[in-house]
Amino acid sequence: MGEPQRLHRRRLVLLLWGLLAIFYFYLSYDYIRVSMNDRTFGEYVDHAVQLAADQHRNSNEVRSMILVKAEELGISLRGDQIVIVGAGPTLRVKLDYQADIEVPVFERVIYRKDFHHDVAYRPLR
């Protein structure tokens, strides 16, 4: 095997490892982004429930507040995925949704992460 051929093979292997590293970096970034958006969304849902219970808002207002924040964060959530029970001090909100982790370039879903939130009003102490 000649030296130029070996050098060519090494470059090809290096290129493949580089592409693999980029692929895993993108998947990791997408997973972390989705998880951080969910954490922010969860904090907002908790805040919205506390606020809505204190101000005796109706379920349509609570649902609208949650849907606006979900859209702002790029979370695909429909109104029928939000279950609102009670009002005032008995207010409770449950919601489930999925976020897709996609393969770079091909935009194919390879992983679907499930998120669940169950938030109830907590009176101030």
Image (spheres, helix red, strand yellow):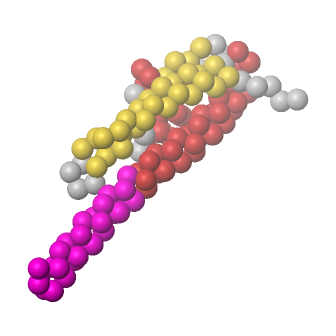
Task: Report whether 77 appears left or right of 2.
Answer: right
Task: Report whether 2 appears left or right of 58.
Answer: left
Position of 106 relative to 16 (above/below): above
Q: Where are the magenta residues, as a range?
A: 1-27
The image quadrant of residue 58 is top right
Residue drawn at 22 percent across, 77 percent down = 11
- In the image, residue 7 lies in the stretch drawn in magenta: yes
Position of 68 relative to 62 (above/below): below
Residue 15: give x, y in percent of width and height: 24, 71
The image quadrant of residue 124 is top right
Residue drawn at 24 percent across, 69 percent down = 13
Quadrant of the snapshot with the C terminus: top right
Residue drawn at 57 percent across, 45 percent down = 40
Quadrant of the snapshot with the N terminus: bottom left
- Picture mark count: 0
Position of 58 relative to 18 (above/below): above
Task: Report whether 113 appears left or right of 106.
Answer: right
Position of 79 relative to 17 (above/below): above
In depth, the one of 34 and 122 nearer the eye is 34
The residue positioned farthest toward the front in the image shown: 1
**Residue 87, visible in the rendered structure:** yes
In depth, the one of 63 and 110 nearer the eye is 110
Residue 91: give x, y in percent of width and height: 66, 18
The residue positioned farthest toward the bottom in the image shown: 3
- Give the main secondary structure, helix, strand or loop, of the magenta stretch: helix
- In the image, residue 124 lies in the stretch drawn in magenta: no
**Residue 73, visible in the rendered structure:** no
The residue positioned farthest toward the right in the image shown: 125
Residue drawn at 80 percent across, 25 percent down = 123
In depth, the one of 39 and 58 nearer the eye is 39
Residue 50: give x, y in percent of width and height: 70, 30
